[in-house]
Amino acid sequence: MSNMNLVGGAQPTQFPYGIWALAAAIGVCVVLAIVSPWLKRRVPHAWWAVWGFPSTVLRVVWTWRRLADLQGLSVARRPALAVLGGVVLKGRALRPVKPRMGFPRWQLGGLVVEVRMHPGQTPEEYVAAAESMAHAWRVFSVRAVSEQRGTVRLSALAWDPLVMPFTPLTRSAGLLSAVVGIWDDGAWWRIDLRKVPHWLIVGATRSGKSTMLAALVHQWARQRVALVGLDLKGGMELSLFGPRLTALATNRSEAADLLDQLVEILLGRMALCRMEGVRSVWELPERERPVPVIVLVDEVAELYLMASTADRAEVARVSTAMLRIGQLGAALGVHLVLAGQRFGSELGQGVTSLRAQLGGRVCFRVMDEGTAEMVLGDVDGTAVDAAQMISEDFPGLAVALGAPGGGWRRARTHAITPRQAEEVAKEFAHLTPAMRDLYPASVGGVGGE
Ligand SMILES: Nc1ncnc2c1ncn2[C@@H]1O[C@H](COP(=O)(O)OP(=O)(O)OP(=O)(O)O)[C@@H](O)[C@H]1O
């Protein structure tokens, strides 16, 4: 009996391996679809990697023909007019040819895809269609840029980079360059002192100035540069980076002495350049080139405030030295990064002249139009309006000059805490040069103690 059961009884159904794999794949997709909103909120980068990117790629490929047709990007291969039995017919091709699209490539929080334009098309047509693409692909924005003739690159961002900034995967930046945040189009916001030698950073209290200084120190501390601090809030902010600072002045009298020393260094470097027959330290052979100096100033207005007539001489000294560094520093490797709540002509005559030397401008949230006007007004009036719209719900959000392609844009700094920068300052303390090392070797020692 038992034998009969074994031989003649019902056999368990054997599903082929492929069906199990398909069922497992569908199961994973269903689970991912269910947890996707939670994942997107909590860990957006992981969400983009496992779900957002693949589903957006499918959407891009799936919708491309219809988008191209509706946006007038497809073209008919046949002429619009045809002769049929002696009659001229005018019409539209039933199936125009869509522009050829490459395969979408992954990028941090977005994707990039190259499109070959049809002859006769210009990138502007794709720029005009970008908003429709963003809707069709369900992404935050799409940008069309043409860097190579005949092709246009479409970059899609999954979310607003200003609200949820990315953290850079790489910290590598060239000498005197630092990635401090992200532009509103998703490109890294890079401050490069070789391109723009001096910077002015202005914002109301709690707007994000110290965080930006921390982000700068976080990167420059790793490079072979000298960092010099002037912090007239008694050193409260910059003393955190003490191990990596070549010098720190915490009151105006110290600041005046330090600035005088920096001017001496400038004059020394100028003499060296004259001797070598070059116009800037960057033209010197590398082994003779003096180490670049970055002067970080927190609460710059304090340098110019006069409580009594006794302060006048000291303010004049400070003002003259700052102006000389502003005028000569770019060629001689001495750079200014000035941060403060305001920086206007009411602080004194030298301020307007110095502002003209500060090509780099960053304006965080400000309390009044006058301050925004002071920072950006002499460069671009529309930027002043944009700066006034920054809400206090977004610390670290700024209007800045120097966006890729020129002009101003909105950008947000990376939320680097002063503690993180302090750690890096400690780690790279061994790179800190002494003040005397900032004088060029051949004229070294001139007041360089
Ligand atoms: N990019 C950012 N993303 C998120 N939070 C930020 C960002 N930048 C600054 N913050 C936060 O905003 C707050 C104020 O920033 P910060 O201290 O840099 O402002 P501040 O302008 O230097 O202020 P104060 O003038 O009072 O020193 C801090 O809590 C900081 O963590």
Image (spheres, rainbow, N blue to C red):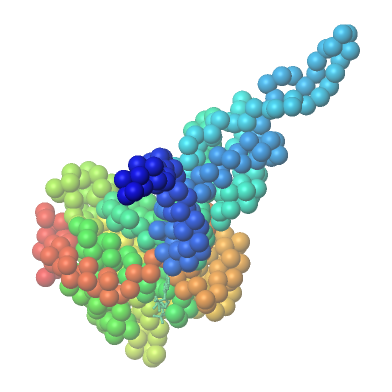
Question: Does residue 301 appear to the left or right of 170 in the view shown?
Answer: right
The residue at 42%/50% (across/down) is 24
User: Can residue 27 be seen?
Assistant: yes
Q: Which of 121 and 208 is in front in this view?
A: 121
| Residue 218 x/y as whole percent | 28, 65
Q: Nearer the viewer, residue 235 or 26?
A: 26
Q: Is residue 301 above or below residue 64?
A: below
Q: Nearer the viewer, residue 410 or 59?
A: 59
Q: In this view, does 245 lie above or below 25?
A: below
Determine the residue located farthest toward the bottom in the rendered image. Answer: 308
The residue at 49%/34% (across/down) is 102
Determine the residue located farthest toward the front in the rendered image. Answer: 1
| Residue 314 x/y as whole percent | 32, 81
Kindly indicate the quadrant of the structure image that contains residue 338.
bottom left
| Residue 231 x/y as whole percent | 30, 78
Question: Does residue 271 appear to the left or right of 56 in the view shown?
Answer: left
Work out which quarter of the rendered image holds the C terminus and state it: bottom left
User: Can residue 202 be seen?
Assistant: no
